[in-house]
Image (cartoon, helix red, strand yellow):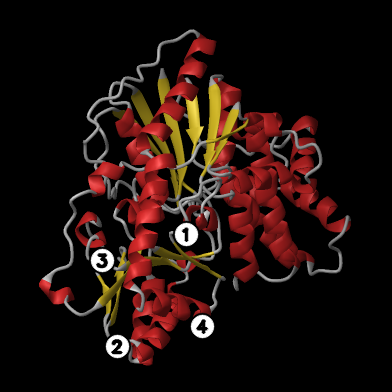
Amino acid sequence: MKICIIAEGCYPYMIGGVSQWIHGLIHSYPKQEFIILTIVADRSLRGKYVYELPENVSGIYELYLNDSDWSQKRNRKKSRMNKTEYQALISLMLGQQIKWEPLFDYFHKKNISLNDVLMGEDFFNAVTEYYQLGYNQMVFVDFLWMLRSIYLPLFIALKMEIPQADVYHCTCTGYAGVLGSMAKYFHGGRLLISEHGVYTREREEELIKAKWVQGIYKNIWIDQFKKMSTLAYNSADIITSLYRHAKELQIELGCPAEKIRIVSNGIRVDTFQDIQGKSAEDKGSINIGAVLRIAPIKDIMTLIQAFGFAKETRPNLKLWIMGDWEENEYAQDCFELVHVMGVSDVIFTGRVNVREYYGRMDMTILTSISEGQPLTILESFASHKPVIATDVGNCRGLILGENDDYGPAGIVTRIMHVEEIAQAMLLLADDETMRKQMGENGYRRVRAGYQFAQMQEAYRSIYQSFADEMQISFNGEVEGEEASWQA
């Protein structure tokens, strides 16, 4: 059986929880063939992998959402839509019983130019119909260009030549879900979607805060992501969710409940045993560790502000921010904030082997505005460390427990609440007994319900069920349990 992993904005270019999950999953079945279809912004990232691809990856295909042929000469034959194709385009804009199949076929016609499509008569007429149904109070030219910007990345995805595989495993809905649905349409096979966060909700949160898009255009963008997710939910054979509330959100967004299985994240707990403890330079300090991507969604600005206030009360606090900042404007803003506030003992480590740092920490922290089921919380628990985290995703369930009596393994705070986060730091900094007890509670919780082997077996079972249905072989034999699966 050939499995195609379809990833968006992560593996193998970026360090992060989803990338780590993909890398670990592929390593789980070393005798099974995988191929990777990865979606990134543009060609500047081409081939710039931060992970060494496992030996059982036989190919990698890249899709660039900011790619286009707009700058090329118009030397290709223009292709007008027929009635069926045009009605499919209208249904896409209106979001009413969208006819995706004619669009799949249309964009795979030979020599279709996106320049000619988006600047052509059919697209202009479709936008005009859409405009007249409810947006004619807006400037038409602005409306037309916004619709072109919305549909350009989708049309680029629809032109993608999908590699043939038996199973398409998407790590989200969105553009990855569109590719997976299109792959199933052209090649058959099975479609599995593993949502690590609820994609539509995450994009909605980002768009609400975005400054580059204003007013009603935010709603049009949000609706477009909902349309893509609906396609993915309807096309998928199985959808996995990390925890119960995420499943409820998926159902609320139109995902058929009978397709959903809850499969929690898991880590190799034993790899965090016997890790290095505090060093001589840590003597007398209280170390707070943040293992994360330096990105706006992690809200590191709030973290720095909260740490600054807490440090005024407890000068021995140190904050370790462990994440890559290469070519990252947001990271530069974070550095500047530290400088402007005059906060000392904020250490940006860059990319590190986190096993060398967890043991030195007294606690870890996440101040994200959106999460799924963070691996860094599970790793902290495996390292016997308590966690402070904002009440997003499954953070509350991990820290306070779900259907277990292990007790709290840290403190949950509100999003962007500087004072509350600072107080949580101080509470744990002042009570070593509490820290140790919470660390042990977390350790027992991760051992009981979040082991890598449990996740591994869940996906082995899903893959095997697909293989049985298609009457093909799946080599799900597990080898190399201790093999490295970090970047």
Identify the amino acid type marked 2. Pro
Per the image, the residue denoted by label 2 is 315
State the CA–CA distance, disc 2 to disc 1: 27 Å
Q: Residue furthest right?
A: 133
> Residue 460 location in percent, x, y?
42, 24
Q: Estimate how packed mark 3 is, as few (under 14), some (14 to 19) or many (20 or more) residues with alpha carbons within 10 Å.
A: some
State the CA–CA distance, disc 1 to disc 4: 21 Å
Q: Residue furthest left?
A: 280
Q: Estimate how packed mark 4 is, as few (under 14), some (14 to 19) or many (20 or more) residues with alpha carbons within 10 Å.
A: some
Identify the amino acid type marked 4. Glu
Check disc 2 and report its element: helix, strand or loop: loop
Per the image, the residue denoted by label 3 is 350
Check disc 3 and report its element: helix, strand or loop: loop
Identify the amino acid type marked 1. Pro
**Is 383 left or right of 441, judged from the image as shown?**
left
| 3 or 4: mark nearer the eye | 4
Per the image, the residue denoted by label 4 is 419
State the CA–CA distance, disc 2 to disc 3: 24 Å
Residue 277 versus residue 330 in the image, above or below: above
